[in-house]
Amino acid sequence: MFRQILLFVALFSVAFSDLAPVPTSSSVQSEDGSFQWKYETSDQSQHQEGRQLPDGLNVQGKYQYTDKDGNEIIIQYVANHEGYHPSGGSLPKAPPVPPHTLRGLEHNAAHPEEDQLV
């Protein structure tokens, strides 16, 4: 999992490396395995990430940039044994559940005995 996260960060960094130089960066890694790093480019894009122990399986981070329309995009994420979990106002939202699907779910909840039929 940690390798996947590093690969994602590396690909993200390479994809945007031609856009702006990185005037500010810092990185700290402790002997216990916890770490913290961040950078900011000259176009104000930022990325930061860290892992603190004892819950060292959770990596938390945030990146932000301005899109081509001038909107500030901010994505926060947690990566752990359950996968990569981003959150942010610019991420797509799931469509509402259709009414017929809701009715079917309500029916199933009201009639659990039908689950036993084979």
Image (cartoon, helix red, strand yellow):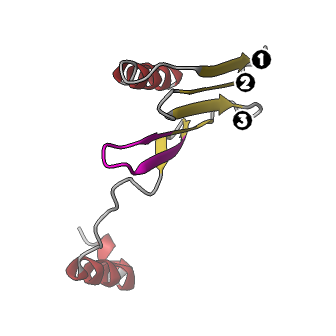
* Magenta highlight on residue 108: no
Magenta residues, start to end = 64-77
Res. 55 mark: 3
Instruction: Tell me where residue 67 appears, x and y as whole percent.
Output: 36, 43
Q: Residues within 10 Å of mark 2 (few under 14, many from 20)?
A: some
Question: Residue under circle 1?
Answer: 30
- Is mark 2 in CB contact (under 8 Å) with mark 1? yes
Residue at 51% x, 35% y is: 44
Q: Is residue 107 above or below residue 15?
A: below
Q: Nearer the viewer, residue 57 or 28?
A: 28
Kindly indicate the quadrant of the structure image that contains residue 59: top right
Q: Nearer the viewer, mark 3 or mark 1?
A: 1
Q: Main secondary structure of the magenta part?
A: strand
Q: Nearer the viewer, residue 100 or 67?
A: 67
Residues at marks 3 and 1, CA–CA distance in whole angstroms: 14 Å
Q: Is residue 52 left or right of residue 80?
A: right
Q: Residues within 10 Å of mark 3 (few under 14, many from 20)?
A: few
State which quarter of the image contains the C terminus. bottom left
Res. 73 mark: none
Residue at 46% x, 24% y is: 9
* Magenta highlight on residue 68: yes
Question: Residue under circle 2?
Answer: 34
Instruction: Tell me where residue 64 appears, x and y as whole percent.
Output: 49, 41
Count of numbered labels shown in the rendering: 3
Kindly indicate the quadrant of the structure image that contains residue 58: top right
Q: Earlier in the sequence, mark 3 or mark 2?
A: 2
Instruction: Tell me where residue 33 appears, x and y as whole percent.
Output: 72, 19
- Is mark 3 in CB contact (under 8 Å) with mark 2? no
Q: Earlier in the sequence, mark 3 or mark 1?
A: 1
Kindly indicate the quadrant of the structure image that contains residue 30: top right
Residues at marks 2 and 1, CA–CA distance in whole angstroms: 5 Å
